Amino acid sequence: MSSISLKLGYKYLRSNKGGMFSFTTVLAITGLMIGIASLIVVTSIMNGFEKELENRILGVIPHSVITSDIPIKDYDQIIKDIKNNKDIVNASPYISIQGLITSSYNSSGITLIGIDPAKEKSMSIIPEYMLSGSISNLNEDNTIILGSLLAASIGAYIGDEINITTSDIKTSIIGSYPTSVNLKVIGIYELKTEIDQVLTLVSHRTAQKLKNIKNNETLSIRLKTNNLFNAEIISETILRDLNNKDFYFSSWKSSHGTLFEAIQFEKLLISLMLFLIVAVASILVLSTVVMTVKSKEREIGILMTLGANSKQIILIFFTQGLIVSLIGIIFGVLLGFTLILNLNNLIFFIESILDRNLLDAYFINYFPYFIDYYQIFIICLISFFISLIASLIPSLKAIKLNPVEILRHE
C-alpha cells in the first residue's frame, strides 16, 4: 500500500488535463525556486563584499599592535621572541604618527606610519597595489608613499616635495614649534578604500627621526597573525610570554570591528527577509496540498473503506509536498549558481542598457561573490524543513475526513 500511496501522491500533482503538473503545483515550485535562488545570490554577494573588505582593509591595517608608553628598546630581539609563537606570521617595528600634509596646492590631515620596507610585503597588501613606485624606494632618506585619493586631493605627483607637520613639539633657544619635515613622493598606491585618503608610508628610520628616538628604539611592534579573528587572544598570549608590564596591545577590532559587525548584522537581516520569500512559497505548497485534499475527498473516502490506514493517507499528500519541495529547491540551487557565475556579465548588460556604472560610488567596480557551500546547504535544509511542515499540515487534515459522510453525498 505504501507504493500505491507514493504513486497516488505523484498522480495528484498532475493536471486534470494531462499536463505534467497542475497550475498550483507550478506556482509552488516557481515560488520555492525564486526564494532559494534569491537567498543564494544575495548571501554570496554579501560574502564577496565582506571578503573584499577583509582583504582590502584588514590586509593593510595591523592585526594587532604591541605598544608601550615609552619607546621600546632593542625591538629586534623582542620581534625574534614574538616570532617564536606559531600563531604569528610575521612581526615588524611600527610607528604611527598623526600629522598634517601640505603641498603647494592643498593640505590634509593624515596618519603617517613608519614601516620596515623589507618586511612590508609579508605584512600588508600595499606592495601589490602600487600604482607607481615601489615600497623598496622608501629606503632612500626623506621619502614618502601616498594613497591615490590623498595625492589627488593635494595635487602631489611622483618626485614632488611635500611638507609633513606633526603634533610633536620641538624646543630650542628661539622657542617651541611643531616638528616639520620635507619629504619626496616616491610612490602612490591605490586600494580604492577610505584608507587611500589618510594613510601614508615612510621608512621606520624616517619615523624615528620625526619622533626623535634612537635607532634601536621603536614605539610599537606590528603583528600579523595566522587568524585575524583570534588576534586578541594571540596578542594576550604574547604579552604573557614577553612578561613586560609596560606593554599592552590594541587589535583591528578596536578601529574597524564595528564595520564587520555591521556587515554580519546586515547579512542576518537580509537573510531573514529573503526567507520570507521561502515562507510564502511554502504557503503555496500548503495551498496546493489543501486543494488536492479538497478535490480528492471522494477518493480518500473510497481508500479508507478499502482499509487504508491513517499513515498511508498521510503519505499520499506528504509525498505530493515532498516532490514539490525537492523540485523547487533543486531548480532554485541551479538558478542561483547560474546567476552567481554569470553575475558580472548580467550587471554589464544592465549597465549597457542604463548607460551608467552601477558601482561608481563603491571602492570596487564589480560585484564580488564568494560561494559558501555550507551556507547554501543550510539554506536548502531550512527551506526543505519549512516546506515539509507546510505539506504535513493538510496531510494530517485528510485523515480526519469521515468516509461515511463523504460517500453518502455521492
Image (cartoon, grey):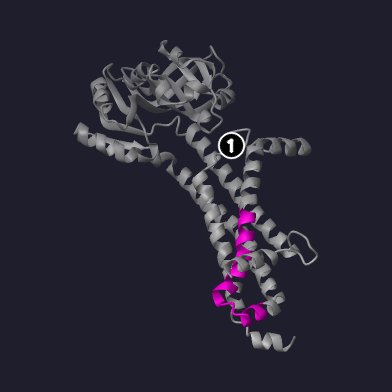
**Total numbered badges shown on the rendered structure:** 1
Residue 58: x and y, percent? 45, 34
Which quadrant holds residue 397? bottom right
Classify the position of the C terminus by image quarter: bottom right
Q: Which residues are magenta?
A: 300-329
Q: Nearer the viewer, residue 355 or 275?
A: 275
* Residue found 35% across the figure and 16% down from its top: 205
State yes or no: residue 316 in magenta: yes
Q: Which residue is mark 1?
A: 368
* Residue found 49% across the figure and 48% down from its top: 264
Establish if 266 lies above or below 211: below
Residue 301: x and y, percent? 66, 81
Which quadrant holds residue 206? top left
Which quadrant holds residue 236? top left
Q: Main secondary structure of the magenta part?
A: helix
Label 1 Cα neighbours within 10 Å, binned few <14 / some 14-19 / many ≥20: some
Q: Is residue 161 left or right of residue 92?
A: right
Q: Is residue 179 left or right of residue 404?
A: left
Kindly state the secondary structure of the residue where label 1 is placed.
loop
* Residue found 54% across the figure and 13% down from its top: 160
Label 1 amino acid? Pro
State yes or no: residue 311 in magenta: yes
Q: Is residue 259 visible?
A: yes
